[in-house]
Image: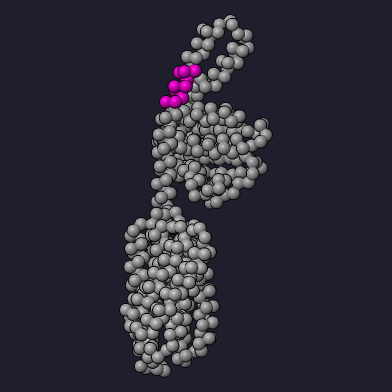
Amino acid sequence: MNLADIAIHIYLEILLEWLFEYSVFAFLLFLPAKRRDHFPLRLILGVLGVAAVAFPLAIFYNFYGNTVLGRSFVYLILFASVIAVQFLCFDSNRRRIFLYGNLAFAAQNATYILFTAVYSTLCFFTQPYLLNVWQYKLAYYVHYAVWAFLIYFFLLRRANKYLVKMAIPKSAVFMSGMVFLVSIFLTSLHDISMQQALDEIYPRVSTPLFLLQVGGYTALFLLDITVGVVLFVGARFAAAAKTVTDLNHIIEQSAKQYEISQQTIDSINIKCHDMKHRINALVGDALPEDTIKSISDEIAIYDSIIETGNKVVDVVLSEKTLLCESRGIDFTRVVDGKAVGFMSSGDIACLLGNILDNAIEAAGEVKKKNRRYINLSLQEVGKGIVSLTCMNYYEGERSFDKGLPLTTKNDKTYHGFGMRSIKEIVHRYSGNLNIKAEQGVFEVNIVFFNLVA
């Protein structure tokens, strides 16, 4: 059978079918991506542009598609044209678009190869051509739809969850690009070699050739699946590493903020203490006693010194007390700062700071003044056992994921690190964290065990 004897429209149909199959996976991967302005118009222009490229490629395929380099060239140009459309339609960086394109190709190629391998096996054990053209296409697209769902649901969807969070390294792009080129070349080599061999021995395939054919398909299938799995695992590790880096950065910033807050509060205490004496010296008996007392009480708010036995805890509580006062929140506490002496300064500042920041934000949104309330308890409840509990009222609904409350902010990407940093610190000291929100009361319970040296 001579490839040049087949009408060009058959090759055009083959290329358009490949474009459709590839585009399905590309669409699924690009679902979360930000679309450019006038997206529908860009998409229409892009589709028309790819269709315009497909026609001359079909002509080229007619004359050179029976060579490995010729067929590889056709799909390489077709792939490049689709990548250009993705650049046209989506507002994303070049590495991400190229990587997504390679993932979509690997998924499409794996689906095609799997069906071809299964169909070749059935033909070997039954008859050379088990289905006619339309039956073959129907069976293929049913298979394609099933595998498109499975690949997306179990691999692409999860990979995308982590890919959107990671900065795409050059190594990942280079690796996926090399695998893409190798996959195109080997698929073309395998298909052409098998077709030529089958034409020579038609109608019955010999056992050695059958084993070679199926073995080749299996190797190609595993190559494409490996691309997806490696990128998925790599993206997951990269996302996890970025999260840990971000959390460590938050903890470091908390330590720096503690130093700044300490200096600020010390300065405020000194100024307020001095101001009380100046008021008494200047005013004397010129003002009514109750007026002087009211002024002194106002100043005393900023002059109050919190002493818990731990300087870091003192500073954090002083800062949050002032914040609660400014927002009309009643903040009660029973705190033994010495109980967290086993923790580093940065961890203490980050842990208490984030817990109280979340509580202050939630309590500040409560409309009833008598429910604008926070209670904090930090004590050693037994030998080597430390309990930390924070309770506050809240309004609205709270949703949880893996034991942590989801952020109520509209931008989910850059919020929610507070709770994750709390979990990280508790885990670092082998503690237990339990968070619940029931009947308008939000409660954080942390217990640290076996802290006796």
Task: Judge whether residue 278 is colored magenta.
Answer: no
Q: Does residue 116 lie above or below 284 as drawn?
A: below
Secondary structure predominantly adopted by residues drawn in magenta: helix
Q: x, y percentage for residue 64? A: 34, 83
Q: Residue at x 64, y 41 (%)?
A: 395
Q: Is residue 309 visible?
A: no
Q: Residue at x 57, y 19 (%)?
A: 298
Count of marks overlaid on the render: 0
Q: Is residue 137 visible?
A: yes
Extreme-top residue of the structure? 285
Q: Which residues are magenta?
A: 263-272
Q: Nearer the viewer, residue 72 or 316?
A: 72
Q: Residue at x 47, y 38 (%)?
A: 351
Q: Nearer the viewer, residue 208 or 239?
A: 239
Q: Quadrant of residue 328?
A: top right
Q: In the rendered view of the protein, which quadrant contains the N terminus?
A: bottom left
Q: In the rendered view of the protein, which quadrant contains the C terminus?
A: top left
Q: Does residue 281 lie above or below 338 as drawn?
A: above
Q: x, y percentage for residue 221? A: 40, 74
Q: Residue at x 33, y 68 (%)?
A: 178
Q: x, y percentage for residue 212? A: 35, 83
Q: Does residue 238 lie above or below 433 as drawn?
A: below
Q: Nearer the viewer, residue 399 or 430?
A: 399
Q: Nearer the viewer, residue 219 or 15?
A: 15
Q: Quadrant of residue 270?
A: top left
Q: x, y percentage for residue 85? A: 44, 66
Task: Judge whether residue 269 is colored magenta.
Answer: yes
Would residue 166 appear left or right of 382 to someone viewing this image? left
Q: Quadrant of residue 224?
A: bottom left
